[in-house]
Image: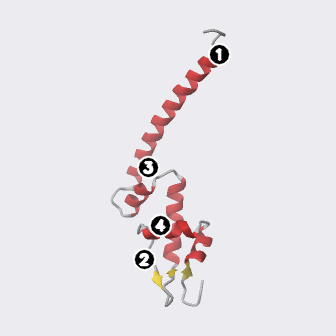
Amino acid sequence: MSTDGLWSIGELAERAGTTVKTVRYYSDRGLLPEAVRSSGGHRRYGPEALDRLVLIRSLRSLGLPVPDVERVLDRDEALEEVVSGRLRELGGQLAALRWREASLRLVRDAPAGE
């Protein structure tokens, strides 16, 4: 952190374990707190941006798409509602995968010529 208590976009990305491109993307979508601009026009971020970025990355690691993350962060939808919807989707995908697995096993185990 510099003497002004703010990080460059590269420093923020490094602290969050992500790339500058990712930080810029989330910032441009309005998911991060508004960056202060340096006299040279460079983005400068405070600790609240790091906290928000870590939260975004955690939600994304759960498989939540960016629009769902936006709804949670904007408080348009509660985290529980978003997670419940995602669980329903995963349940359907798992059922389809189980059916596909069973079908493939039947084909594999069928006697030759059938």
Q: Give the spatial CA distance, label 1 vs label 3.
A: 38 Å
Q: Is residue 39 above or below residue 23?
A: below
Q: Which residue is labeled 2 in the image?
A: 34
- Which residue type carries mark 4? Tyr
Q: Nearer the viewer, mark 3 or mark 4?
A: 4
Q: Nearer the viewer, mark 1 or mark 3?
A: 1
Q: Marks 3 and 4: CB-CB under 8 Å? A: no
Res 10 quadrant in image: bottom right
Q: Is residue 40 above or below residue 14?
A: below
Q: Residue at x 48, y 40 (%)?
A: 90
* Upstream in sequence: badge 4 or badge 2: 4
Q: Give the spatial CA distance, label 4 vs label 2.
A: 11 Å
**Local SS, label 1:** helix
**Local SS, label 3:** helix
Q: Is residue 82 above or below residue 96?
A: below
* Upstream in sequence: badge 1 or badge 3: 3
Q: Give the spatial CA distance, label 3 vs label 2.
A: 27 Å
Q: Marks 1 and 2: CB-CB under 8 Å? A: no
Q: Give the spatial CA distance, label 3 vs label 4.
A: 21 Å
Q: Position of residue 3 (x, y in %)?
A: 58, 90
Residue 36's mark?
Answer: none
- Which residue type carries mark 2? Glu
Q: Nearer the viewer, residue 55 or 13?
A: 13
Q: Is 74 on the left or on the right of 92, as rendered?
A: left
Res 113 quadrant in image: top right
Q: Position of residue 17 (x, y in %)?
A: 62, 66
**Local SS, label 4:** helix
- Which residue type carries mark 3? Val
Q: Which residue is labeled 3 in the image?
A: 83
